[in-house]
Amino acid sequence: MKRVPVTITSVSSEHAGDLFLAKNLCNELGILPGRHVIQCGGISRSVRVLFPMNERPSVCAFSPDVMESLALFEGAKLLLYTDGEKLRLGPVLGILANIRVKDGGIDGQQAPVFKHLLTLATEERMYAYLFSPQELVSDKLRGYVLKKTNEKMTWEIRDVPFPDVVYDQIITRKFENTPFVKTMKEKLIAKLGSAYFNPGYFDKVQVHDWLNSSDETKVYLPATIQHVDLKKTEPFLKKHNPVYFKPVNGTKGLGIIKLVRLIDGRYMYQVRGKNGIQFHGIKKSTRHVLNRLDRRLKRRPFIVQEGLQLKTYEGRPFDIRVLMQKDHTGKWRRTKMYCRVAQEGDFISNLSTGGDAVSVPNVLQKICTNQEEIRSYKKKIDKLVKLVPVVLEKASGMQLGELGLDIGIDAKGWVWLIEVNSKPWKKPFTEQGSMKLVVKSFRRPLLYGKYLAGITQ
């Protein structure tokens, strides 16, 4: 595949159906002036390729009718490449999201994330835009592009071509599970196949079943059952201490219940809310504590997981979050790794609910007695994070591009997989970490999108 970087511009309206390309671009692409089919995303049309009177290297100058029919805009920086007999512009990346708009711009907690993604997409010469399931109509749809206007980056809603690749950034299960959204996503996946990545949230039962079916990964899983009724769960509580009840479709550690069997046989329970421990108490037996929690456990499905005797950092629980992403070759790579340390008195280490981010070297130096022990932990973690994405992708049949893995280290030195997040949250800034890694964590999904579109470096 031959490809060249180009900037899109338009010529006067007296022309129709024309594309002006400098002779050097035609030579690089191996094409001659004359009739050609050009495609941008899901839109294609015939154009007449001409040499311009004034040669402008790296410029694609279209007549206005072609600009409109291909949904192009002035100043877009893209790749022009050959695909068999056709010319193609792109690649076109659609970022599917639940978009919030205020005063004509993108609003909400994802707004900085989207701006960072589209800014980097411009650097990668991609036609990238945001769109919601409601905008999905035929081969042309409405999407938000990020454009430079008077030295400022502003959002503009406009017609855009159907994407070559979709990066799913819907981050709420409630929105994802609405019938309309599910139908639209099914249509997109049916049309794009493997070019649609990170298609949805996992539930904890699925993840456990997938990983437990592999001899390579099941050794890293805590004992886990699905809570069906009191009769089935009671023996599990008597066998393991402590235990955690986790919502099957939960996020951010919300709704988790911790049960601890005390020396006298009574049970202490703690329920995790948005701002810490929501409520707690003590009951005299497994039956009494389950009866106390029964109404809550019937509201939604839960798994029950053994509580591991994990190492702590300065007396506080911690886990190791590893961000795994596919790169420009479609291979899984570790992008970031850091420790999440719970607030004092809490048992959940999520940063969104008050946990602290601490570097892995700092934590390992504190909990290990020598360098050999540190190297041993790093080796075990490296093996685990390489196995899990491959096993999950194969077992689930999903096209994945990134995963967040939460890992714990127990008192005996074994590493455990505590949680897998199919929609890991990424901030476009950092207060303590490396901005280089932050940028890499945003760029890698874009490079993987280019790979899925057939653009390899």
Image (cartoon, rainbow, N blue to C red):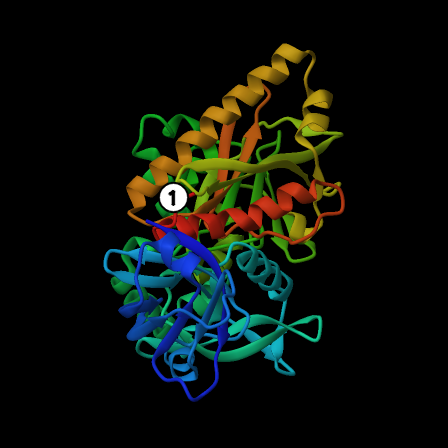
**As drawn, 449 above or below 7:** above
Give the image quarter of residue 373: top right
At mark 1, the secondary structure is: helix
Q: Is residue 231 visible?
A: no
Mark 1, other Cα within 10 Å: few <14 / some 14–19 / many ≥20: some
**Residue at (40%, 40%) from the top-left corner?**
329
Image location of residue 407, percent across then percent down? 54, 33
Q: Is residue 239 above or below residue 168?
A: above
Residue sitting at x 66%, y 30% = 360
Left or right, 431 with respect to 185, comes to right
Compare residues 421 and 332 and report the one nearer the observer: 332
* Residue nearest the observer in this picture, 400 or 78: 78
Q: Position of residue 427 (x, y in %)?
A: 64, 53
The answer to whether residue 329 shows anywhere in this view is: yes
Callout 1 amino acid:
Val
Report x, y in % for residue 135. 41, 78
Left or right position of 213 against 401: left
Which of the 4 image quarters holds residue 69? bottom left
Residue farthest toward the bottom in the current orientation of the protein: 14
Q: Which residue is drawn at the image coordinates 63% and 56% (left, top)?
A: 273
According to the picture, the residue beneath numbered tag 1 turns out to be 207
Q: Nearer the viewer, residue 112 or 235?
A: 112
Q: In which quadrant is the C terminus drawn? A: top left
